[in-house]
Amino acid sequence: MAICTICGRKYNRLTAPVSAKRICSECFFAQLEAEASAGDLQPTEEGPSDRESQPLPPPIPNSLGHSTRVEDFLQHEGILVSQRGVFEVQLGKQIAGVERADIAQIRVAYASAAERPVFEGAVGVSLLAAGLWGVRICLRSLLAFYLYAWLLVMGILGAAMLWDVLKRRYVLFVTAHDGRLHKLPFYVAAYPRDIELFLQKVHQTFGLDIYSDVTEIRPNQSLEVLNQGESV
């Protein structure tokens, strides 16, 4: 664990980007968005060296009437949402995602995180069977271990694929305008209550309507109404 030099919060160094210098992932991505927006504002010709720095662009109103800046983003358990779109991140790196202009629908569900569960399950079973056969062979002699150790590796890969297929978790199903369906899974340890608060904040901040197949998660309910209901 380490303490971020910007926000002062504790963070795990293993989950922070490699290029981050003693700052957490949230502050690192905020700096990247701010630098990108500042770079777009620079004029094509160089002016005097003592000119004042360009201010950030004005707030962008969303469909709910709230104002957000281009560097604003929200991140929770492997999912990052910003004005650019919705993305899956792992260890500070973007793995997959959909640009905001391409989003047709967002839905949260409790399902397998595998993109093609049937295909990946069949491949996983085959690899696991090969690995188990390799274990049987390798137990006979040391020479067989050197010759068939690659079967053990296949078995490990097969077990990992089966785990990804069989382990259910909370997933964002993002449908693009071209009909493609993207699966953006939360981490396995994500709790439905935390996901609900995160998606409600996404709805309020960026105006994204999110449907839910999970009864415990109501993403489009405002935080004010939810807090009033809890206080009653």
Image (tube, rainbow, N blue to C red):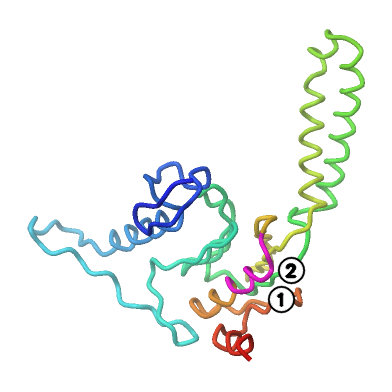
* Residue at the spot of label 1: 212
Q: Which residue is located at x 71 percent, y 76 percent? A: 212
Amino acid carrying label 1: it is Ser
Secondary structure under tag 1 reads strand
Distance from Cα at disc 2 to Cα at disc 1:
6 Å
Q: Is residue 193 magenta?
A: yes
Residue numbers of the magenta segment = 190-198
Q: Which residue is located at x 44 percent, y 46 percent? A: 2
Q: Is residue 162 above or below residue 27?
A: above
Q: Are marks 2 and 1 in contact (CB under 8 Å)?
A: yes
Secondary structure under tag 2 reads strand
In this view of the protein, which residue sits in the foreground, 41 or 191?
Answer: 191
Amino acid carrying label 2: it is Ala
Q: Residue furthest front?
A: 232
Q: Residue furthest bottom?
A: 232
* Residue at the spot of label 2: 109
Q: Quadrant of the C terminus?
A: bottom right
**In the drawing, does residue 146 fall left or right of residue 44?**
right
Counting residues from the start of the chain, the first of labels 2 and 1 encountered is 2
